[in-house]
Amino acid sequence: MPARPPEPSVASLRDSPGDPPGDGESLALYWRFYWAVAEAQLARWLPRHPSRILDLAGGTVGSGAQAAAAGHRVIEVLDPQLNSHPTPHPDPGPSGPGGPGGRARRVIADSGALGFLADGCVDAVIAENRVLSRHLVTEAAVAEIARVLRPGGRVLLSVDSLTLGMALLAEQKRWAHLSDVPSAEVVLVPWPDGTMTRCFLADQLRELLTDAGLEVEWVRPRTVLSPSTVEHVLAASPRALPRLVRTELNAPLNDDSLGVHLLASARRPDRPG
């Protein structure tokens, strides 16, 4: 049996899903698996009946197009500040008609301040592709999500984990900052392109959602399987992708923060009575 390759460096993980695969440590096989898992997770999470959905990823990933193809009416928010980054893989394709009864339309707006929407006007919110980690005052963005959700509405979101943040600080040799992380309530980490990201432990993410008046349904790493494991298996057997995705989806729910990205689902409580 060939030796398993070493665990990839943080440099190869920080570039995706925000950047297209490059050379060297691009982990193309892992990111193919990552997006297949993300698509399957969203398919499981989407409402079963036609709904009005707000997609805060701004067309940078295929979540809005996938929801429209499933028959939902989707509002995609294109945030000029966040969309200045390279378009990630995969390409979501043009906005337009979706599945039966489904349609996606795009709005240019601040994805952290949803003043163009009335209270309780959407059935669900998708905040994929780490969009809330890029809003450094995440509390305000989550409060806006809670406001526009109808009672009983749900949000699916992904953020950068503290595991990724600490690895980035170590890679940049910011030892003083790294030593402050255990006592910090908010962890902001610089990226090589000059932007900042806010990183979370699972408990911090739960607290953030709860403080906004949302009921947390679950928090888990985006993927439990490690990049090196996925790369090793797919390099040996490319047809193993569906089996790996099923394994990921059937893994026990686990809210530890060891993954590079955390995924969470929360619900706005119904009105009393």
Image (cartoon, helix red, strand yellow):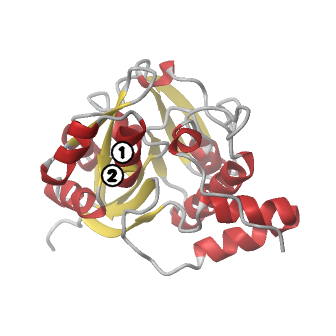
Please report the residue visible at 67 percent of the width from the left and 65 percent of the height from the top.
229
Instruction: State whether residue 192 appears in this view.
Output: yes
Judged left or right of residue 73, residue 257 is: left
Could you say which is closer to the camera, residue 187 or residue 271? 187
Residue 52 or 107: which is nearer the viewer?
Answer: 107
Most foreground residue, 95 or 156: 156
Q: Residue 162 carries which label?
A: 2
Query: Which label sits on residue 165?
Result: 1
Q: Are marks 2 and 1 in contact (CB under 8 Å)?
A: yes
What residue lies at 38% left-to-right and 54% top-to-bottom?
Answer: 163
Disc 1 crowd rating (10 Å Cα; few below 14, some 14-19, many 20+) is: many
Q: Is residue 112 above or below residue 143?
A: above
Q: Which residue is drawn at 60% across and 57% down?
A: 7
Judge from the rendering whether residue 95 lies leftward or rightward of residue 165; answer left or right.
right
- Estimate how packed mark 2 is, as few (under 14), some (14 to 19) or many (20 or more) residues with alpha carbons within 10 Å: many
Q: In this view, does 18 lie to the left or right of 40?
A: left
Q: What kind of residue is marked 1? A: Gly
Could you say which quadrant of the image residue 238 lies in?
Answer: bottom right
Q: Where is residue 248 in the image (x, y as percent from the top left)?
A: 61, 71
Horizontal side of 222 relative to 185 (left or right) equals right
| Residue 228: % across, % down | 65, 60
